[in-house]
Image (spheres, rainbow, N blue to C red):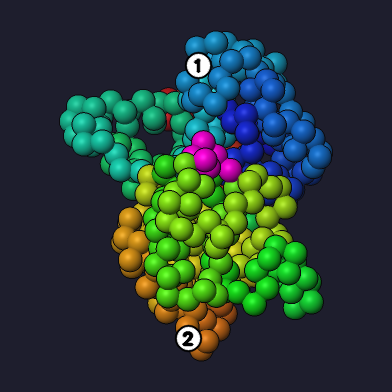
Amino acid sequence: MKVIEALSDTNIGGAGRLLLTRLSNSDRGEFDTTVILPRGSMLEGEFGKIGVRVICFDGGADRSFDPRAIGSIFGIIKAESPDIINAHGCLSARIAAALCGVPVRIYTRHCAYEVPRAMRIFPIKQLVGGANMLLSNHTVAVADAARKNLVDMGVREGRIKVIINGVDGLRRYSDEERDRFRRELGVDGCFVVGICARIERCKGHECFLRAARILSRENEGYRFLIVGDGALRGECEALSRALGIEDRVIFTGFCRDVERYFNCMDINVNCSVGTETSSLALSEGMSIGLPAVVSSYGGNPYMVRHGENGFVYPVGDFFALADMIRRIAEDRELYQGMSSAAYARYLSELNSKKMTEQTEELYRELYREYVSGSVGLTS
């Protein structure tokens, strides 16, 4: 089965990491996969490391739609003649695949946000939904919140498959390893609250820092770890100084090896306010038993079952965020119960094996339909 996976990312973001994980676990004997990327993408070398063939196209760098990219991708598809193409948010690839008549065309939606009212009512909803279904035989939503977005925009529910993001899981450090790294980081003996996300407006770092101020005033034993980088890092560093907590907050910057930072945390936080599906960082934390406190935005309430493997607070409410962190930190029995539930949640649904199996079964199902002649250019 010949498959093309298409991305427009030049950085190593969630969609790229997700695809790297899935292809690392894929059945190479059954699926002959090529990844197409914009020229200069950081992902090219990463796919090379796992032995996946990459072809680069012109244009389309970090843009879903680019007329120049359509022509370049069209040429690649014509030469490769795939059975299946899965476009990860890359509209240029979807258009090129439809023009080429690729039998099975899948669109994977990796984001979830409030759909503008104009797109949820006639006639825009019908036009957008019709265009989506013309360009794609099927759609994968990586969270129920993403599925809802698609339905709101006119895509039929029967054409959507929800496949939750999965991760390989982190190695859980021994007590000795964990203590050594915590000493190196300067948080030995502290209760460490962490957030692992791009430092962008939609990820809600301001809420995290304001909750950190509340907790720091109450207890000197808290430390706050911000793992990642982004356009607003300088602004967040300035806010931490303005709040008087710069000595309690550690900014790690971009790092490829997040495992040691997760092993340093006691609680994993997600403060998203703009877009969130099934957070890889939440799954990674749960793979080593970290309870989580998350905003009620997007797919977060699905990932964290309130009162079971963590707490869900109202978006933007840093008082509630601080209160829920405090409740977990101060109740050892509650912490242990949530830790066990978090690990069980990872094993049952949030792992790479389940994600890969579900995706490959969808590919087989749609491929069988194509072979039988029931999937065509406009189906």
Q: Is residue 239 above or below residue 350?
A: above
Q: Which residues are magenta?
A: 229-234
Q: Position of residue 31 (x, y in %)?
A: 72, 40
* Circle 2: element type: loop
Q: Which residue is mark 1?
A: 66
Q: Which residue is mark 2?
A: 331
At horizontal 21% and vertical 31% (from top left) the residue drawn is 118
Q: Position of residue 371 (x, y in %)?
A: 59, 34
- In this view, the residue in front, 80 or 378, is 80
Q: Residues within 10 Å of mark 1 (few under 14, many from 20)?
A: some
**For residue 364, which quarter of the picture?**
top right
Q: Is residue 279 above or below residue 192?
A: above
Q: Is residue 334 visible?
A: no
Amino acid type, mark 2:
Asp
Q: Is residue 279 visible?
A: yes
* Circle 1: element type: loop
Q: Position of residue 370 (x, y in %)?
A: 56, 34
**In the displayed structure image, the side of residue 132 where residue 3 appears, left or right:** right
Amino acid type, mark 1:
Asp
Q: Position of residue 60 (x, y in %)?
A: 56, 19
Q: Is residue 233 magenta?
A: yes
Q: Nearer the observer, disc 1 or disc 2?
A: 2
